[in-house]
Image (cartoon, rainbow, N blue to C red):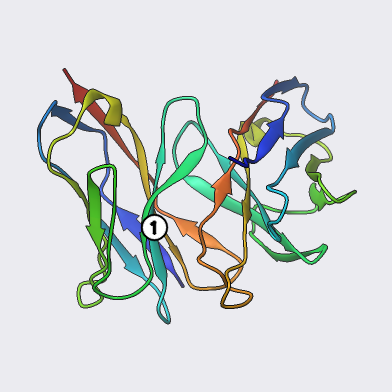
Amino acid sequence: GNSVTQMEGPVTLSEEAFLTINCTYTATGYPSLFWYVQYPGEGLQLLLKATKADDKGSNKGFEATYRKETTSFHLEKGSVQVSDSAVYFCALWTGGFKTIFGAGTRLFVKA
Amino acid sequence: EPEVTQTPSHQVTQMGQEVILRCVPISNHLYFYWYRQILGQKVEFLVSFYNNEISEKSEIFDDQFSVERPDGSNFTLKIRSTKLEDSAMYFCASRPTGTSGISGTGELFFGEGSRLTVL
């Protein structure tokens, strides 16, 4: 079945460090891939998305490239800020009624 | 900007009691969902709802759970007889269709959640 695997956290970084959160997926067909972010006490919100192979999604300095050959969609940011502290979820959607989420990766950024 | 709203934000109940969680999806969206999150971790799919019926449900969504769209705006999740393990954050989400037809882009719009505590 379809699934999403992302690196376990928590990830702790100093401000201005480089961030990578790994995400790989298993899916039949050609899924759309997403990163959602959950700030403390809030619901999930879409951070970025990519709908086909080699697409790069980007938003707020974050980016991720849809790699079909490695079935990956790793999230990166060149210089993190304290305000980026949150839980990040990788997700996939194959056009049906359900979006599947990874387990989430908690990021702490220290000043 | 339109948003998904959920009530209550927090509910405490005794085991065995019935609970209804309410959601108002974004008005022109056609797909509605309930997810739950235990202890701030994995987001688990419960059920999807389209065209006034359940379109897909997970193994978690057993006979104790039901959903309803009683009018044109509300979408509710009912738990008939709560158990301790139902304690979680419950998120409602909705999804628009895209211009290319029924599928759309797949982006989900989430509410801020209803925290359920079962004692």
Left or right position of B44 against B42: right
Q: Is residue A37 visible?
A: yes
Q: Amino acid at mark 1?
A: Phe
Instruction: Tell which of A89 and B84 is nearer to you.
Output: A89
Extreme residue in the bottom direction: A29
Q: Secondary structure at mark 1?
A: strand
A3 sits to left or right of A109: right
Q: How far from the left and from the top, in percent, is residue A32? A: 41, 68
How many callouts does the rendering have? 1
Instruction: From the viewer's side, name the closer residue of A35 and B34.
Output: A35
Question: What is the crowding at mark 1: few (fewer than 14 residues within 10 Å), some, or many (at least 20)?
Answer: many
Q: Residue at x 52, y 63 (%)?
A: B106
In the image, residue A83 sits, relative to residue B57, either above or below, namely above
Give x and y (percent) for residue A41. Answer: 49, 25
- The vertical placement of A42 against A65, above or below, is above
**Residue at image mark 1:** A34
Query: Quick check: can you spot residue B118?
Result: no
Q: Position of residue A68 (x, y in %)?
A: 26, 76
Left/right of residue A11 with respect to residue B92 in the rendered view? left
Image quadrant in which the C terminus of chain B is located? top right
